[in-house]
Amino acid sequence: MIPTAPKRRADREDFKRAIRIFNRVLTELGKGKEAAAILDKLPKESSADGEHTAERQVAYLKLQALIDIQEANLKEKKPVDVAVLKSCIAQLKPLQFGRDGVSASASLQTARIYNIIGFNELNTAKPEAKGGIKTFLEAIRTIKMVDPFLEEMEKARGKESSLMPEAMYLKGLAIRGNDVDRNNTEFERVLSSLSHNASGDKFYSLQNFDKLQAAFEEIGTNLINKWQSIYCYIPRGYDGRVRWTIECGDVARKFFMGANASLGKLTYPNKDRNNCVMLGIGLDMTFPVTDLISVGGYVELNTSGEVGFAFTPTVMFSFPNNSAIMLGIGYRGADHFVSNGFLMRAAYKLTNPWYITVSYSVGHGNTFMVGAGYTIFGRKIE
């Protein structure tokens, strides 16, 4: 429990100093009401002028405690009570009429409130509501009005107790806030107009970094629905930069060519010729007809001791993850075209440039071959 002020003048000064320390500690702890209430313990002066000055000081300190709480909320991204701040502006106005330290400090606290309200609007205002933040200009006007008096006080009291550094700091904050608001408004106006002029484009204005992932997810969905896929991730140990990669479907919307080699066995069910190993080299080519489908063909030279040839029309189905499947039906001639047959072939392209192939042909001789290929054109773009 805090006692009442002592009667001895020396003790009273120590008591007032202790009250102000308690006020500052409670303010730092976020206990605004308690910080303001404890100022009522400050003793009143006996003379009329002294009593009036003391009342003004107490009123100023109470308002300062409330402002401190709202500024702490702004820094911690908590809700700022603008109504309380506007009430503080109204209560500070009577304190500004005078030629003492209280009046000068009251003017600076008013400018401080305007800055808090302005930065709170920057953090919370919707894009269409921005560009009209006038509180920064009010803060600058308030400081300009009191500048001459602050210079007089600095000459009279010395630079050690001058309020000019605080005034310059608050003015700098107001100028920066006004520039940010003006620049943001101009950037948003230009980018928004560009997106409106382009078919199917959309402009995203984000006031919170936490909303960035959701925006990229929406962009990715739109691109996938159109023709591309987009991936975004924030590296561990985020340092302010975002890595993002756009990947086109590997074959979709572009020409594809791949070279491959295969190995297999040629067998003769009628036993009229010897079974043998067969080696083939081939080339796959497709051209896009839609976002996900390409058509083309496959050609092959093979040997099992004698030269052979194969070809198939090919259809390629691409997927957003950059993989693809190729299917073909055609003809294979092997063993100097003694083994002529109906050829079925399939290939699966991995998310990297490699792909694997399987083929089977039926005729006078049957062949089964497995191979691997490498993408020459149509690799993914990063």
Image (cartoon, rainbow, N blue to C red):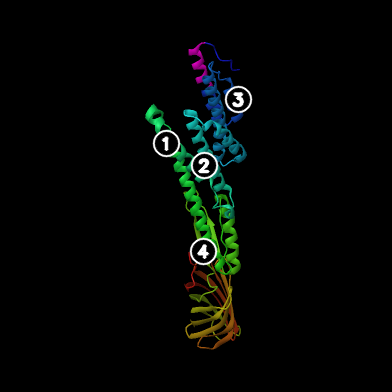
Q: Residues within 10 Å of mark 1 (few under 14, many from 20)?
A: few
Choose top left, top right, bottom left or bottom right for residue 275: bottom right
Dividing the picture into quadrants, the one containing residue 219 is bottom right
Residue under label 1, please give it. Answer: 148
Q: CA distance from mark 4 to mark 1?
A: 58 Å
Tell me the CA gap for discs 4 and 3: 59 Å
x, y percent for residue 27: 55, 29
Kindly identify which residue carries mark 2: 115
* Amino acid type, mark 2: Asn
Asked if the residue under mark 4 is in contact with the one under mark 2, i.e. CB atoms within 8 Å, the reply is no
Measured along the vertical axis of the image, is residue 75 above or below residue 2?
below
- Estimate the spatial distance between the alpha carbons at disc 1 and disc 2, rounded to whole Å: 21 Å
* For marks 2 and 4 on the same chain, the one whose residue lies earlier in the sequence: 2
Q: Which mark is residue 246?
A: 4
The mark that comes first in sequence, 3 or 1, is 3
Q: Residues within 10 Å of mark 2 (few under 14, many from 20)?
A: many
- The range drawn in magenta is 8-19
The residue beneath circle 3 is: 37
Looking at the figure, which quarter contains the N terminus? top right
